[in-house]
Amino acid sequence: MKQIDINVRGMEMGYKTASIIAQALAATMEKVPTVVAWHDKPHARMSPNIEGGDINSRWHDYGESFGGEFNITINGEYDFIFTDSENFDTVESTAFRMVKDSEGHEYMCQANLLRDPNDPGKTCEQVDKERGAYGGHGGYA
């Protein structure tokens, strides 16, 4: 994986600013740059947040293992691992569809089983927006 180190002086640097700089640089290198993993060293945060993982290395191992092509480090404190997602499947090209029922609840449905988009019924899993997961009929939460 390629390593790119950027040092910025003369301005306050935080996660948000570092992310904007990294995204702008990545956009010059890939058609559809996508962050695979990141690390915020000053605040001891990482994504994905892997319980029990070493905060200083687990995010890097994950990013490298899941297609990371380059890591952009800003001021030695913020890391962003990117890949190009140009050839990834989109939601529109998968066998799943997101629908809302008449009360506005959002569901993920297997398209070939969905009979009525206004009544997801037992063929779909309700989205749990609070937890960022799917739950219900055997889904994961």
Image (cartoon, grey):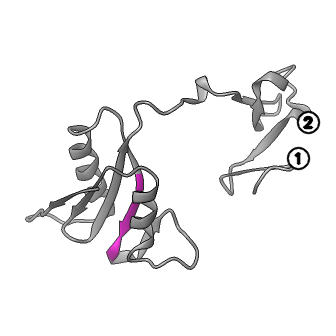
Residue 49, label in figure: none
Give the image quarter of residue 9: bottom left
Q: Going by the image, does 101 lie left or right of 75?
A: right
Please identify the quadrant where the N terminus is shown. bottom left
Of pointers 1 and 2, the one earlier in the residue sequence: 2
Q: Is residue 34 magenta?
A: no
The answer to whether marks 1 and 2 mark residues whose Cβ atoms lie closer than 8 Å is yes
Coordinates of residue 120 in the picture (x, y in percent): 85, 30
Residue at numbered disc 1: 137
| Above or below for 111 versus 71 | above
Which residue was labeled with disc 2?
Answer: 122
- 16 sits to left or right of 106: left
Residue type at numbered disc 2:
Lys
- Furthest toward the left, the residue is 10
Please tell me whether residue 84 is drawn above or below residue 94 in the rendered image: below
Q: Amino acid under label 1?
A: His
Q: Which residues are magenta?
A: 36-41
How packed mark 1 is, by other alpha carbons closer than 10 Å (few <14, some 14-19, many 20 or more), is few
Residue 129 placed where, x, y %? 68, 50
Tell me where residue 44 appears, x and y as whole percent. 40, 77
- Circle 1: element type: loop
What residue is at 78 percent from the left and 38 percent from the top? 105
Q: Label 1 to label 2, Cα distance in Å? A: 7 Å
Residue at 68%, 57% in the rendered image: 131
28 or 11, nearer to the observer:
28
Depth check: 6 or 18 in front? 6
Q: Quadrant of residue 99?
A: top right
Does dot 2 land on a helix, a strand or a loop? helix
